[in-house]
Amino acid sequence: MSEQLDWGWRYAAVRPDHFRVEYAINPYMDVRDQPDPARALAQWTDLVQTLQGLGATVEVLGQRPDAPDMVYAMNLGLVASDDAGPRVVMSHMRFPERRMEQLSSAAWFAERGHRVSWVGRDGVGGHFESGDAFPFGDALVAGYGPRSDDIGLKSLAAQLQVRVRTLRLVNPDLYHLDLAFCPLDARRAMVCPAAFTPSAAAALLDLVPEALVLSAAEAATFCANSVVVGNTVVMPACPPRVRAQLEAWGFRIVLVDVSELHLGGGSIRCLTNPLDIVVGRDLPAVPGGDVVALG
């Protein structure tokens, strides 16, 4: 088993008290197919308790009544603390239907001592959604296209003073990086090449020393939208071939049903935002920031 990730032990999550499908901004959403509120809350609670049972900490935000997608906490902003203390770069959502989420979550982060900055506001400065970025290797690996854009990622790199490696996403069903890429440890990750341009897929596979390559059908189960706590992968589904490889690598698999939350287009990773990424430990500091386009 390779070196475990240092991050992934502390999360923010939004209780789904007002979760519903009020509009359609991704291929999974259909306003005619509404989640059952009691079942959605029970599934979310099971996820939180599962993470806590594995030794992770989960900090809960309240959900704005006017923000039905706020339950997908991964997209609120990117927490990447540094020598000066905790900080968060808030997302600037592609769709205006979600932008009010940052107003409440920014205050929540500030109350907990985070320095708060923004990628774009009021249509200025590009777009960035934090479900498009993960630390891996010597950089922040970031997807762009459907939601984030190159201007937003340049702003992110400059604010955090880190290297960002960008990859173009082109599959409408895999519109965020966290639907197609899941870091497992320092050497391994799940990767779905069908999410990317051919050049971006090849570049990402070159970055990952040991990749578990997912087919588009496997990725459609949301299996890449999982979280890793130590050597345990908390997953919404695990196709047989994926399970065999994960177990061969020494990972333990825990399945949690969040099917009601799938109606909004997100799964376990989308429901959780890691709060323990650290510049200098998980991401090398790069003065001035740096953006490297990989495809």
Image (cartoon, rainbow, N blue to C red):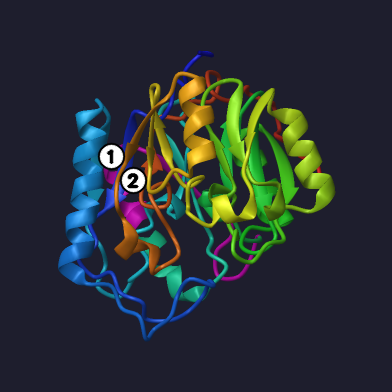
Labelled disc at residue 109: 2
Q: Is residue 24 above or below residue 49?
A: below
Return the residue nearer the eye: 60 or 176: 176
Q: Is residue 162 left or right of residue 96?
A: right
Q: Which residue lies at the image location 31% right of the left edge and 55% below the top edge?
A: 258
In the displayed structure, 171 sits above or below 97; it is above
Pinpoint residue 211: horizontal percent, then vertical percent.
Answer: 65, 30
Q: Quadrant of residue 76?
A: bottom left
Where disc 2 sits, the SS reads helix
In the displayed structure, does residue 266 sit left or right of residue 145?
left
C-alpha separation, residue under disc 1 versus residue under disc 2: 5 Å
182 falls in the magenta region: no
Q: Residue furthest bottom?
A: 32
x, y (%) of residue 58?
25, 38
Tell me whether the residue at label 1 lies in contact with that at label 2, contact meaning CB atoms closer than 8 angstroms: yes
Corner quadrant of residue 62:
bottom left
Residue 13 visible (yes or no): yes
Q: Nearer the viewer, residue 197 or 16?
A: 197
Q: Type of residue at label 2?
A: Phe
User: Considering the numbered disc 1 on the image, is that residue within a helix, a strand or a loop?
Assistant: loop
The 10 Å Cα crowd at callout 1, few under 14, some 14 to 19, many 20 or more, is few
Residue name at image x 33 percent, y 60 percent: 259
Taking the image as drawn, is residue 104 in sight?
no
Residue 16 placement (x, y as % from top left): 24, 62
Label 1, on which residue? 112
Q: Which residues are magenta?
A: 104-125
Q: Residue at x 73, y 29 (%)?
A: 207
In the figure, residue 165 lies in which quadrant?
Answer: top right
